[in-house]
Image: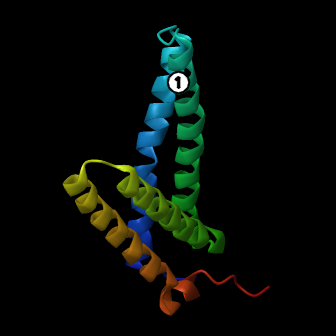
Amino acid sequence: MKQRPIGVIVYAVLFLIGAATPLYLSIMAGLQMLQGQLSAPEDLAFGVTYLVMGGVFGLYLICTGIGLLLLKRWSRWLALLSALISSAFIIYVGVTSSDTLNTIRNLLVILGWNGVMIWYFLRPSVKAQFVSRER
């Protein structure tokens, strides 16, 4: 049985913790819709968006975290994909934002974090942990 690197465990736990926010927002949006608190069309559209996107993104993060713990090859690719998508999104926010100082600081922190994640999961020793077993 392969030994999980500590970094993989850390990232897996962070993905699982990160799933809590979108799932919470999704559940809260669903409850508000059920209770009739979102009656205006724009509020309802916002609630449906949170319900669907929060649920999908939360499940994506849970699947990635569990896959990393199980050393599944596809989960390594999902982790890399999430770092790339997050980087593209934060660059977009940085380009379109008017709050320059906070945006630049957040941009650098998130890009740095994503850069470390990409570097970590592309390391040959980590990549070798996710290679499928021969049959």
The amino acid on which the numbered mark 1 sits, given as a three-letter code, is: Gly
Q: Is residue 130 above or below residue 109?
A: below
Which quadrant of the view contains residue 6?
Answer: bottom left
In this image, 135 relative to 60: left or right? right
Name the residue nearer the viewer: 93 or 77.
93
- Residue drawn where x is 44% and y is 73% of the image: 8
Task: Give the residue at the far left of this rendering.
Answer: 101
Name the residue nearer the viewer: 126 or 57.
57
Which quadrant of the view contains residue 105?
Answer: bottom left
- Residue drawn where x is 49% and y is 24% of the image: 29
In this image, 2 relative to 117: left or right? right
Tell me the colour scheme of the image.
rainbow
User: Where in the figure is residue 109, as x and y percent of width and height?
Assistant: 28, 65
Name the residue nearer the viewer: 67 or 121.
121
Asked whether residue 4 is in view, the answer is no
Q: Quadrant of the N terminus?
A: bottom right
User: Where in the figure is residue 99, as x and y percent of width and height?
Assistant: 25, 48
Q: How many marks?
A: 1
Q: Residues within 10 Å of mark 1 (few under 14, many from 20)?
A: many
User: Where in the figure is residue 66, as x and y percent of width and height?
Assistant: 55, 60
- Residue drawn where x is 55% and y is 85% of the image: 127
Asked whether residue 57 is in view, the answer is yes
User: Where in the figure is residue 20, as x and y percent of width and height?
Assistant: 42, 43
Task: Give the residue at the far bottom of this rendering.
Answer: 124
- Helix, strand or loop status at disc 1: helix
Q: Quadrant of the C terminus?
A: bottom right
Q: Is residue 81 above or below residue 135?
A: above
Query: Where does label 1 land, which residue?
Result: 47
Name the residue nearer the viewer: 5 or 79.
79
